Amino acid sequence: MGRSSTWAGLFAWLCVSLFVPSGVAGIELTVSVTGQGKKCYGEQVSKHELLVIEFGVLSPPGSTVSVSVLSPSTTIFSDHDREKVKTAFTTYEAGPHWMCVQNDGPKPIEVNMTVLAGPQAKDYSKIAKKEHLEDTQITLRKVEETLRNYHSNVLYIRAREERMRETNDSTAFRVIGFCLFNVLLIIGVSGWQMLYFKRFFRSKKII
């Protein structure tokens, strides 16, 4: 049992090291916001991915902020006049998600912002206790979920590239059509001018 666990742990470590992308699954930063100012942080997120976002005013004490979380198409969460805000949700569409914080007061403030996504956002200690999992099984589950999120991101990027390619092809077709129309128009106008001047010169008996 001990040897099999060791080999499973080594396999999990290799999966994490070789196959799991090094994208940002969690970030913590301090943001300086001017009086009545607003700052936003964007993160590429997969579909059906857990996000945990926390805001907290560091200084000056007693200051409040308004926060909002936006998906590519709508506002997912918003709260106002708070010193600390924490929210968690599962995304329903892939793409860039924006976490915005706005200073409600006239003086500059510093805000701590923590964003956890995917496996980093889950409390695996509770899952391990509930399902009686070993450390190796927890690691493998993290790897599985990370790879699932990575695959979802790849599919989203591929679909977006396909849409951009279709848009480029459509634009190129329209440009070519417009150029051909201009060429035909110039030829037609030139022919009409030649006929007009020919008739004009004949009427004046110049030719």
Image (spheres, rainbow, N blue to C red):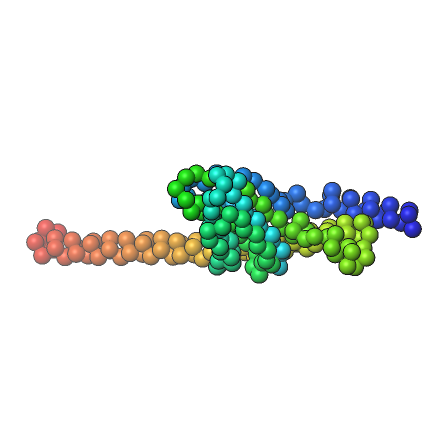
Residue at 91%, 47% in the rendered image? 3
Q: Position of residue 134 (x, y in %)?
A: 82, 52
Residue extending furthest left? 204
Q: Position of residue 42 (x, y in %)?
A: 52, 47
Residue 114 visible, this orientation: yes
Would residue 58 be found to the left or right of residue 141 on screen? left
- Badge count: 0
Residue 72 visible, this orientation: no
Residue at 43%, 55% in the rendered image? 171
As displayed, is residue 95 above or below residue 18? below
Comparing 137 with 166, the one in front is 137
Comparing 25 with 204, the one in front is 25
Would residue 119 be found to the left or right of residue 105 on screen? right
Residue extending furthest front? 62
Q: Position of residue 140 (x, y in %)?
A: 77, 51
Residue at 46%, 51% in the rendered image? 81
Q: Position of residue 147 (x, y in %)?
A: 69, 52
As displayed, is residue 132 above or below residue 105? below
Would residue 54 be found to the left or right of residue 192 on screen? right
Residue at 81%, 55% in the rendered image? 133
Residue extending furthest bottom? 92
